[in-house]
Image (cartoon, grey):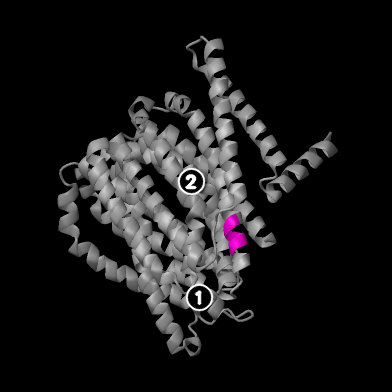
Amino acid sequence: MGVIIRQSIKGTIANYIGIAVGFVTTFFILTKYLTTEEVGLTRVLVDAAILFSTLAQLGTGSSILRYFPYFKDDDKNHGIFFWTLIIPFIGFLVFLVVFFLCKELIINTFQDNSALFVNYFYFVIPIAFFMLYMAVFEVNATILNRVAIPKFIREVVIRCCLLIGYILFGMGVISLDGLVIVLCATYGLAALLNLVYLLSSGKVSFKPDFKHITKSLVTNFLWYTLFMVVSALVNSAMPTLSSFFISAQQGLAFAGIYAIANYIAAVIEVPYRSLGAITQPHISVAIKENDIPQATRLCQKVALHQFLAGSVIFLIIWINIDLFFHILPNGDQYVAGKWAVFILSLSKLLNSSFGIGGSALGYTKFYYFSLIFTLLLMVASITLNIVLVPKFGINGGAMATLLSYLIFYVFLLWFVQKKVGTTPFSWNLLKVVGLIGLLYLLNVGCHFVSSHLITSTSIVPWLAEAVIRTGFICAIGVYILYRWNISPEVNLMIQKVIAKMKRSS
């Protein structure tokens, strides 16, 4: 676990640096200089590219993690990196044809309410291509236990480049055309940097080793990839379905509001981006070696720590949500997404905490059952979006996402426990639920008292009150967390911090 912890910490640091840059970009630049329609345009372009690029991978991301143990032999990797280049390229060509075949349908769907997206429709292709190989190089780095730098590129470099683009657009240096070109160039730069880093490790060779490819391995790989393509369709479409429905039925302006709400909620998933990425290869090895107890321990640790971190972040967001929209540039336009933030935060917490259970299923002989569950998720999401978006707008889109994930995980995790014997649930996870409930009630009491003590309409005292109240609640939370011994790893970190403070004093 030493490598896992170190890489996870480094990756999480990179994630939070990116969050800081993204926070400034989204909430002080994007909302200030772009209209809600322009924000919606950038979001829908990226969402469409994500969908395209994920499908084009042909399940390569999951396949690499599953089959890497079959290729690894001491210091040799028997040409697995070669296939990670070729297979996605074939997939890109296939879905490029599908893209053009569906062109008229897509244009007709968005023409009435989101004509601006139609104007920049073709930019989806280069963005998707760069995203495709950025993701491929990231997965290659992951199997080498090198996640920190790729995470830094994804979370920090990309956001810094976009920040520059938004500032140039706001200053009138570039037009909207130029901003979309910056968007394309940014992902191209990220893919190139990931490739350079991967080659610099000295452990990668793109030379094929056809002798290592057996008929049984090819057959298993093809069947697994077939199912992963369907899974990828759902996994990539799920975060974007509501955005597409909202932009098509409500317009890009509402899609822009939804995008801001979704970005706020996305902070909850940040710890899992590193912890899940670095843990998955180890779960794959444990399952291959039939070490189910080890796989269960890893799944439970990931679920517990992600649920703990995500719940705390969720609590901090929600207790300060009104103040946040008050200080947000043009916040009166985006406050319509307040309850979408709440609902999306629950879905992010659910997905990031229990998604590791689905990953574990993908590494077992029962992986093909994921097809049933992913189709269930897709059908539920589409149905709920069709029903809820026209009635409730952006809140309906958020509810569709939450309810579809809830249905999905109820059936998926039950199956994983019955067939694989692995579960992400633990008693300590229930303790976290109780802890967050107590902290929320404490916040209600503190806010009630402060609302009677502070009578000024100025933002300054309320901002100070929010900082003090949040700090107080977090301190109480850390104390209870330590006393309940919910996580031995977290307790050890707290003890080290206390010891350093004592030495420094």
Q: Mark 1: which amino acid?
A: Tyr
Residue 381, numbered circle: none
Place of residue 444 in the rendered image (x, y in percent of width and height, measured from the top left): 53, 24
According to the image, label 2 marks what residue?
A: 349
Tell me which residue sits at (33%, 28%) in the image: 333
Horizontal side of residue 243 vs 108, given as left or right: right
Tell me which residue sits at (67%, 36%) in the image: 480
Place of residue 338 in the rendered image (x, y in percent of width and height, measured from the top left): 39, 31
Judged from the image, the secondary structure of the residue bearing numbered disc 2 is helix
Tell me which residue sits at (31%, 35%) in the image: 36
Judged from the image, the secondary structure of the residue bearing numbered disc 1 is helix
Q: Is residue 345 above or below residue 450?
A: below
**Residue segment shown in magenta:** 296-300
Answer few, some or many: residues within 10 Å of disc 2's Cα (few below 14, many 20 plus, some between 14 and 19).
many
Answer few, some or many: residues within 10 Å of disc 1's Cα (few below 14, many 20 plus, some between 14 and 19).
some
Q: Nearer the viewer, residue 414 or 369?
A: 414
User: Would you say residue 83 is visible in this rendering?
Assistant: yes
Residue 67, numbered circle: 1
Q: Closer to the N terminus: mark 2 or mark 1?
A: 1
Q: Main secondary structure of the magenta part?
A: helix
Place of residue 258 in the rendered image (x, y in percent of width and height, measured from the top left): 34, 39
Residue 260 belongs to magenta span: no
Q: Mark 2: which amino acid?
A: Leu
Place of residue 197 in the rendered image (x, y in percent of width and height, measured from the top left): 55, 63
